[in-house]
Structure formats: structure tokens, C-alpha cells
Amino acid sequence: MTPSEGIERFIRPDLMNFGGYSARRSPETLEGRVKIPAEDIIKLDANENLYGCSPRVSQALAGYPDLNIYPDNGQTRLRKLLEGYTGVDARHVVAGSASNQLIDLVLRLFISKGDEVINCVPTFGIYRFSTELCGGILVEIPRDENFAVSVKAVKAAISGKTKIIILANPNNPTGTITPRQDILELVDTGLPVLVDEAYYEFSRETVAPLVSRYKNLMVLRTFSKWAGLAGLRIGYGIFPLKIADYLLRIKHPYNVNVVALVAVQESLKDIDYLLSRVKAIIAERERLFGELKKLKWLKPFPSQANFILCSVLNGKASQLQQRLQDKGILVRYFNQPLLQDSIRISVGKPRDTDILIKTLQELGEEING
Ligand SMILES: Cc1ncc(COP(=O)(O)O)c(C=O)c1O
């Protein structure tokens, strides 16, 4: 008998077959699988910011003296800084170890076993992950062929067990925007509505200024994408006061570390620099879109985020992903009911686009003869 045998009977039955979240491979874990040195790998698979963070952040962290001191559990300074950035009163703001943690926290607040979560698919996988971790039931509403949300279908799916509607805006992996009036129509149902604006700085579409007018509208944001801090894990949400209060009560103590506070402070001091990078990524997104469109065997979808989804019209997306990986270019592929044979390409620097497009042209000749 091994020491762990029989331990299953103590584990929550609903988690016995829980699949977990399939996170992207980091270049280090690819070592040995790909014949390209880790530093030459072009990482376009996780919607990261390839320009990196503000140099001010790296400088400030190098000399940071107080790692031995716990952060402020009430996030007072951090929330004030975020008030300055968002224009929303700090009392509405709750920060977390990136938006993933806030998604988890919001779902823990609303979802008990058997409660329903309305999710507009295809969308970001964490919503399923966190719902199932809470014992909730995911009610999936398919988006249309252009990945637009049908408000009518969402409303028709509401039952006595529905506790929340989640909407990524822009949506990942499709890059699609849901118009403000549609979001407000969902808010008018009275159900909690969580709008995930992880890519806000790229789309500039937001309902954050409206949160204080409603009791049930919540907005999530992150520093992972526009500010290049995905590895550091810092995000925040804008909530009605009552919900903010509950979230502050149920969050883990000290859930945002001390370096995250410094990183936010320095990023916001360097906002012009960071937003100029965002502008460069948006310009590059448009160039990449044009180049992808020229390849007749891929169909790119217009995007308001820092990535582009493409249908692979000729061949298997999984094979294309593998061929690109062999050449040191990482992209994400999907093959699910509403997202068949598709790849998602994060927007990198101009050189990344050049190498990607040249490689796709070569692969296209191979694939299409
Ligand atoms: C829609 C959406 N929300 C949230 C996240 C997670 O971001 P964070 O790094 O803040 O946890 C992502 C990351 O890809 C995303 O696409």
C-alpha cells in the first residue's frame, strides 16, 4: 500500500474528475521539445505584452527594501492609486493577484453548489474553471458566427438558479466587443453581471464609469496586458459598494503583495510610455490582420484586443500550431464545438509579425502545394 492510497474518499466528490486549467507552456518547459534556444522562441500564445513592463518598475523593484513587511490588507494606497487611474472612487475598487483571483473571488461570493453561471461561449476558460471549483453549473450560451452575444438567448437562459452572467469584453479568444446597450440590457435583469475588461486599454470600451449607478454591475481589469505585468500578478475590480465590501471580507488576507503596489505606482507614473506601447501593439494588430488576410487559407477575425483569432480553412489547427512550434513560434490552437480548427495569435513586435508571416507563407506553400 502506498502512503496516499485511499485518500480519495476524503476528497470532494465533485473534484475527483476535475480537469484543472490547461495553462500555456512556458519556453523553459519546451526545452528539449523544440530545437530552438528558449531565448529565440517567439511567444505569441498567451496574450502577453512583448514590450515588457515599464523600466521604472524594474528599477524600483531592484532596490525595494521592505520585502519582510506584510502588505496593507485594506489595500488603501493601492486602491487610491487605482482611483486616480480609473476615475472611480477608491471605495468601489478591490485589488487582487491579477484578474484570475478576482474572478475566483466573485464566483465564491455568489456561487454555491448547484447554482448556475451564464457564460457566452467560446470565451476565456477560467470562467468554467472557477465555476466548477465552486460546485456551480455552467450554462453555455453560444455566440453567433461573428462571435456576437445574443442578449435574447442569454435572457431566455435565466432560471431560478442563475446567480451571475459573465461577459469578457473584448472577448478572449475572439477579440469581439459587446455593445454597451446590450450589457445594460443584461444589467437590467437585476442579476449580478461581471464584465471582464482585461483588454480595456486596447479597446477603450468600458462600463466602469456606470458601476456606481447599479447594484449589480461589476468590472474587472488587469495590469497583465497593457502594463506588461502578467508575471507579477496584479489586477483589480470595480464593484458596487456593497459587493466591494463583501469581497474585501472574503478575500485572503494580504492577497496583493508589496511589490505589486510598487509596480502599479511606477507603471502609473510611466503611463505615457506604457500607452505608447499599447498604441504600437494596436497598429501592429492591424498590420498583422492585413497580412493574415492575404494568406487565403486563414480567416482572421477583427479584434479589439492584443490578439487575433483565425479559422484555419485548410488543414488542422493543431498541426499548424505544432509546425509553428517546431520553428520556435508559439500560438494557441482551439478545436472545440464552437471554435473548430482555429488559432489565436497574440500581437508581438513588428519583427515577430515579420517572422510569423514569413513562416506562415512557407508553411502555406507546403500545406497547399
Ligand atoms: C478575458 C480575460 N480575463 C482575464 C485574464 C487573466 O488575466 P490576469 O493575468 O489578470 O489573471 C485573461 C488572460 O488571458 C483574459 O483573457
Image (tube, helix red, strand yellow):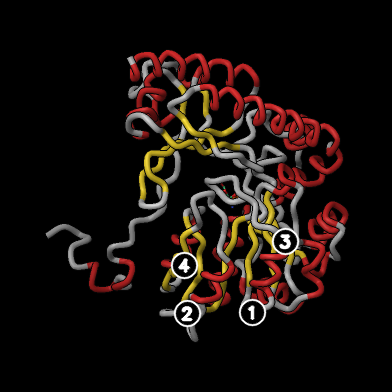
Mark number, residue 112:
2
Residue under pointer 3:
180
Nearer to us: label 1 or label 4 = 1
Looking at the image, is 86 positioned above or below residue 231? below
Farthest bottom residue? 160
Residue 24: give its label. Answer: none
Q: Which residue is mark 4?
A: 131
Residue drawn at 66 percent across, 81 percent down: 190
Say if 365 sits above or below 68 in the image: above
Other-residue count near label 1 (Cα within 10 Å), few / some / many at <14 / 14–19 / ≥20? few
**Picture quarter containing residue 152?**
bottom right
* Residue found at x 64% / y 23%: 349
- Amino acid type, mark 3: Arg
Residue 67 seen in the figure: no
Q: On the rendered image, what quadrant is the N terminus found in? A: bottom left
Q: Which amino acid is tagged 1?
A: Thr
350 up-or-down from 107: above or below: above
Residue 24: x %, y % from top left = 45, 40
Whole-percent x, y for residue 54 in the image: 76, 33
Residues at discs 2 and 4 in contact (Cβ within 8 Å): no
Q: Earlier in the sequence, mark 4 or mark 3?
A: 4
The secondary element bearing badge 1 is classed as loop
Label disc, if present, on residue 189 of the rendered structure = 1
